[in-house]
Image (tube, helix red, strand yellow):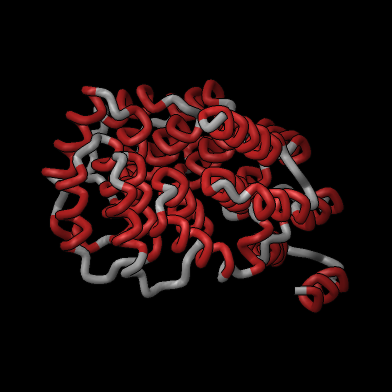
Amino acid sequence: MDNAIRLFSTITNKSSYICTAMFKGLKNNNMPEKVFDLLDQMTFKPDNYTLPILFNVCAQVANNRAMKIGRKLLHNMPNDYRNNNIVLNSAIDMLMKFGDAQSAERIFDSIKTKDIITYSAMIKGYVGNEMSEKALDLFEKIDLKLDDVIYTIVFNACSKLANDRAMKIGRKLLHNMPNDYRNNNFVLNSAIDMLMKFGDVQSAVRFFDSMKKKDIITYNAMIKGYVGNEMSEKALDLFEKIDLKFDDVTYISVFNACTKLANDRAIKIGRNLLHDMPNGNQNNNIVLNSAIDMLMKFGDLQSAERIFDSIKKKDIIIYSAMIKGNIYQVKKSELYM
């Protein structure tokens, strides 16, 4: 990428095509700030190919600089592009990431011919902004063929709410889902998570068993669901069958299962998992928080303190885990006084 940047800097007359290619390359290499730096140096007007990339970068970062740039681009956007769904869909996604649902709604309402991606951007934005009821309101107005993104997002909205309305919509959507999507892990993982949130473990197990190629997200959804439904022994049973690389969610879910049980089996599994955990996962405060919580529940204050001391950037969650653990130990010792 460095060579591409050097080559780009030598070009005197940069066309819109070249700029767009450069922005896209920087975005794909996770260098959003470089995109902003480059944009500040440019005098060209972004076209309908460049704007969606820039809106996507602003959405990805969503800090003060990104918000300022994104809003300015949107404000100065030529009227010609205000009928372009690709541009407007990315603008809606950006505004939702900024937490500006009101502006996103204004753009959504202005679009004459909405496509399924327009609805997806709005519904996903509502869910991300903790407005899942609005997400379901909008979903019920769709008169287009649904795609896998819609199924996933609506299942997520139903998972978050888990009320009577959400259960009704979620179950109906799942029941009427075409067979094409029943082999789509992305969709089925969110369906499993939803069913677990509904307390319908039996249906979640059925979907899990029907999946030919289970990924780590599938196992995570099941394990997390078992823990949430007070079935932590089943969570550990399933964990011991995994033959895939664990991710942060796996560690957190299994540590939580072990915390809830705190029996001989859980202590053995939890300690082994913590001992073998790669360094990459040891930089995640959420993982370490659940590990500290687990060790405190095991009565292993010394190990919990070691992990606590090893954390360079301690946040309120880490301090809370230690305080909560110490309170638990005090109360536990008082029972035997």
- Residue lying at 58% horizontally and 39% vertically, measured from the top left: 94
Residue 243 placed where, x, y %? 37, 74
Place residue 241 in its image quadrant: bottom left
Q: Nearer the viewer, residue 68 or 214?
A: 214
Q: Which quadrant, please, contains the C terminus? A: top right
Residue 73 visible in the current orientation: no
Q: Residue at x 50, y 52 (%)?
A: 252
Judged left or right of residue 248, residue 261 is left
Q: Quadrant of the N terminus?
A: bottom right
> Which residue appears at 81% of the width and 56% of the height?
38
> In which image quadrant can residue 65 be found?
top right
Using the rendered view, name the quadrant where residue 21 is placed.
bottom right
Q: Is 268 or 141 nearer to us in this picture? A: 268
Spot occupied by residue 158 in the image (x, y as percentages of width and height) = 30, 33
Query: How many dots with numbers?
Result: 0
In the displayed structure, does residue 30 sit left or right of residue 233? right
Does residue 3 appear in the picture of this structure?
A: yes
4 lies above or below 334 = below
Left or right of 260 on screen, residue 326: right
Pinpoint residue 331: horizontal percent, then vertical percent.
Answer: 57, 29
Q: Position of residue 66 (x, y in %)?
A: 72, 41
Residue at figure coordinates x 12%, y 43% from the top left? 175
Instruction: Judge by depth and name the residue closer to the eye, 324 or 205.
Output: 324
87 shown above or below 13: above
